[in-house]
Amino acid sequence: MISLASSLTKQDPLLLEPMHADRGKIIIDGNAAAALGAMFAGVTVCDLVSHYAFFLSGRKLIDFMKKHRVEPDGKASFAIVQAEDELAAVGMVLGAGWAGARSMTSTSGPGISLMAEFAGLGYFAETSRSHLRISSASVLSTGMPTRNQCRETCSPSPICPTANTKHGHAAPRFCQRVLPVRHGGL
Amino acid sequence: MLLPASVNECYQFAMEAFDLTEQLQDPGIRSLRSRYRHEQLDVRPVRLSRQATEAGKVLPRKTWTVLGGFER
């Protein structure tokens, strides 16, 4: 076999060489990037509903926090709480935000509709908190057969668009003007 | 409601979200698309800034000027 390969002569003009297109880059997915951003932003409370697929982002957050947010004496400077449902998750996040902690939870499009009650309460109580909303490939969680991701964004009720919970008032009307101001902060 | 369009923005908007929610005292939503949520993409690492997090509930004057006021 070796002698056969050495006896071949290159006759085509093709030449392969490494492109080094990934030089200086890291390979990461959106879940890990969002988890890293949340950790460096100082999130201390994260409520999770772990039976969902979007728990992956929270899972990565747990891994990062265990690695970087543990005090020298071994005590964790964060709290990861397993919630029984979406309403409980956003309720605990709301309470943590009310107490001054930077808190977050993750959910999906239909999941954020289940948080509708506390979403309205948080708006009127002027309590800051952060959701990490993972959109599925479809509006109604049916997957790719009904793929239409843009509809979630373009819904008349952008904060709870996937079900019949209309909390359009919770979306600040000036958000489109805020984003260009803060964009590029890093 | 922040809609990141890339993996880099997933990281950047995660930090922005907490600052905005505290300054505006409103709930914030980061909406990730499943396209770049699951895909392993090669991105250029961003440099951490000391001013990345602006903990507190005060809107900077520059933002107030652009907003032209606050209204619920």
Image (spheres, coloured by chain):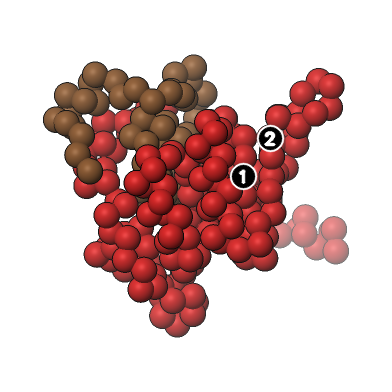
Please report, as a chain letter, where disc 2 is located: A
Q: Height in image: B62 above or below B20?
A: above
> Crowdedness of circle 2 by 10 Å Cα count: few (<14), some, many (20+)?
many
The 10 Å Cα crowd at callout 1, few under 14, some 14 to 19, many 20 or more, is many
Question: Does A28 appear above or below A185?
Answer: below
Can you identify the residue that label 2 sits on? A78
What x and y, as percent, mark residue A19? 54, 42
| Real-space Cα separation, disc 1 to disc 2, in angstroms | 8 Å
The amino acid pointed to by label 1 is Cys
Q: Are marks 1 and 2 in contact (CB under 8 Å)?
A: yes
Which quarter of the figure is the C terminus of chain B placed in?
top left
Residue at point 84%, 59% (across, down): A3
Residue hosting label 1: A46
Q: Chain B is shown in which shade?
A: brown
In this rendering, the answer to whether A115 lies above or below A61 is below
Instruction: Spot the red chain and give its letter.
Output: A
